[in-house]
Image: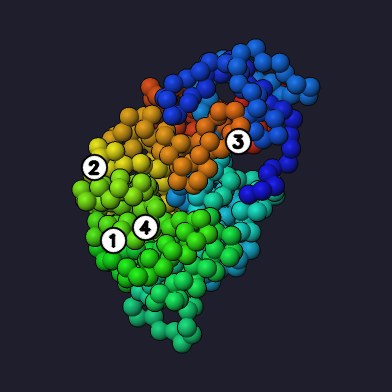
């Protein structure tokens, strides 16, 4: 992410109520963005020549949202089929999915399997309209793990033709090391490992642990050697806790964590990224979008547990980050996670999960998730105070008239003529 979007005219927002997620307070005033960055905040700012000026009176301006668990290439819930689909077809739909995310207010997303250097570079140079992408390439999975899409009756002669483009098989410390180095060579911002069973895989169980401790340690060691980190897919406390003990920095899902998990998350200054909306969506719509029946049955095992896990983590003071993990046609529910989390957490905590906490996880603290001077000028505008009514963030079509990325209005529901 170096080149940035094409430069646009300076943007001056006047009379806005601008939220600082850190303090949870609004400051009323103007914000000036030049060359994609916030350059000035204050009152009665002078408009530079050629600036576009918008009066934001009565509106609420927040930093652009960050979704820290997406799969932009998950064009269907039948993940195994993606590997045998034309890459150009997958790319075309990926671009459409990314545009939808931006329109919902997500100006940055972290991809947990599927996105690569190419799509991230195309977005960064402005060729593809979508959120900035922090990508991890292909997730590392053991044979028979969450990234192994072969059914129990599937026989293949080749070595590793088993995985959708979102994951790869590596068994043993040396193979994990080589796969990790290969993903890092290709520019990954983080590594993803499958540390437990999952919903969308045909032969494992939710409560299984995956990868040995030395294999997990090898992935962490390779990531840390490049000043990167490891994100681990894990549901059950047993899998979560051993992953944390090896130095994994973020736990994805974590629906079945225990008190020891909370303690380890705090001790290691690690992050928990629940993805509750995906179970909500899979339970309602999964089969219609290609989710196999075996996987659909697993959804119910993890759905209710997820809310209890969120409450346990919130009470324990864990740093929570916003995630959605939606697949195929279910991407449109991306903002529903706000409504689900509001059942457990105060609005400001959920907003922090999608701004400051996510920025810290991505290693971009101060640059995204905030609108302080120097930050990237990524913002959303709401017509309702989300601190009073967080559901406004769950209904962007109703309550989010503007999305701003790199100081340019990229989505305008009420364009001025
Ligand atoms: Zn997962
Ligand atoms: Zn995922």
Of callouts 1 and 4, which one flags the residue occurring earlier in the amino acid sequence?
A: 1
* Residue contact at pointers 1 and 3, CB within 8 angstroms: no
Of callouts 4 and 2, which one flags the residue occurring earlier in the amino acid sequence?
A: 4
User: SS at mark 3?
Assistant: loop
Q: Nearer the viewer, residue 38 or 307?
A: 38
Badge 2: few (under 14), some or many (20 or more) residues near its Cα, within 10 Å? some
* Distance from mark 3 CB to nearest ligand 2 atom below 8 Å: no
| Colour pattern | rainbow
User: SS at mark 4?
Assistant: loop
Q: Nearer the viewer, residue 409 or 413?
A: 409
Estimate the spatial distance between the alpha carbons at disc 1 and disc 4, rounded to whole Å. Answer: 9 Å
* Residue under numbered circle 4: 247
- Residue at 43 percent across and 39 percent down: it is 357
* Residue under numbered circle 3: 376
Of callouts 3 and 2, which one flags the residue occurring earlier in the amino acid sequence?
A: 2
Q: Is residue 330 visible?
A: no
User: SS at mark 2?
Assistant: helix
* Residue under numbered circle 2: 312
Badge 3: few (under 14), some or many (20 or more) residues near its Cα, within 10 Å? many
């Amino acid at each position: 992410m170096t080149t940035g979007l094409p430069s646009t005219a300076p943007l001056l927002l006047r009379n806005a109520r601008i939220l600082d997620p850190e303090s949870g307070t609004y400051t009323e005033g103007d914000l000036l963005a030049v060359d994609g960055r916030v350059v000035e905040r204050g009152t009665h700012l002078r408009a530079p020549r050629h600036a576009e000026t918008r009066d934001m009176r009565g509106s609420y301006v927040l930093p652009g949202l960050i979704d820290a668990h997406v799969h932009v290439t998950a064009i269907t819930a039948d993940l195994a089929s993606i590997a045998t689909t034309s890459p150009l077809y997958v790319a075309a739909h990926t671009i459409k999915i990314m545009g939808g995310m931006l329109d919902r207010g997500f100006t940055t997303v972290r991809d947990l399997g599927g996105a690569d250097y190419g799509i991230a570079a195309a977005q960064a140079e402005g060729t593809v309209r979508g959120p900035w992408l922090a990508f991890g390439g292909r997730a590392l999975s053991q044979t028979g793990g969450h990234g192994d899409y072969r059914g129990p009756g599937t026989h293949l002669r080749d070595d590793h033709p088993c995985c959708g483009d979102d994951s790869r098989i590596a068994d043993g410390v040396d193979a994990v090391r080589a796969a990790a180095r290969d993903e890092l060579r290709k520019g990954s911002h983080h590594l993803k490992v499958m540390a437990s069973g999952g919903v969308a895989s045909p032969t494992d169980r939710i409560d299984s642990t995956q990868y040995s401790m030395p294999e997990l340690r090898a992935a962490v060691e390779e990531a840390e050697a490049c000043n990167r980190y490891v994100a681990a897919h894990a549901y059950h406390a047993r899998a979560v806790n051993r992953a944390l003990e090896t130095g994994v920095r973020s736990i994805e899902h974590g629906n079945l964590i225990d008190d020891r998990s909370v303690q380890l998350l705090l001790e290691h200054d690690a992050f928990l990224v629940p993805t509750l909306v995906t179970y909500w969506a899979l339970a309602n719509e999964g089969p219609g979008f290609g989710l196999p029946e075996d996987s659909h049955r697993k959804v119910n095992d993890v759905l209710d547990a997820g809310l209890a896990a969120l409450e346990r983590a919130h009470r324990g003071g864990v740093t929570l980050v916003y995630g959605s993990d939606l697949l195929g046609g279910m991407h449109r529910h991306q903002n529903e996670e706000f409504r689900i989390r509001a059942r457990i957490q105060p609005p400001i905590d959920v907003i922090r999960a999608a701004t400051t906490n996510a920025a810290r996880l991505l290693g971009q603290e101060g640059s995204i998730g905030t609108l302080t001077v120097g930050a990237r000028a990524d913002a959303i505008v709401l017509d309702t105070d989300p601190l009073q009514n967080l559901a406004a963030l769950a209904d962007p079509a109703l309550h989010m008239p503007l999305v701003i990325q790199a100081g340019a209005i990229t989505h305008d529901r009420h364009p001025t003529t």
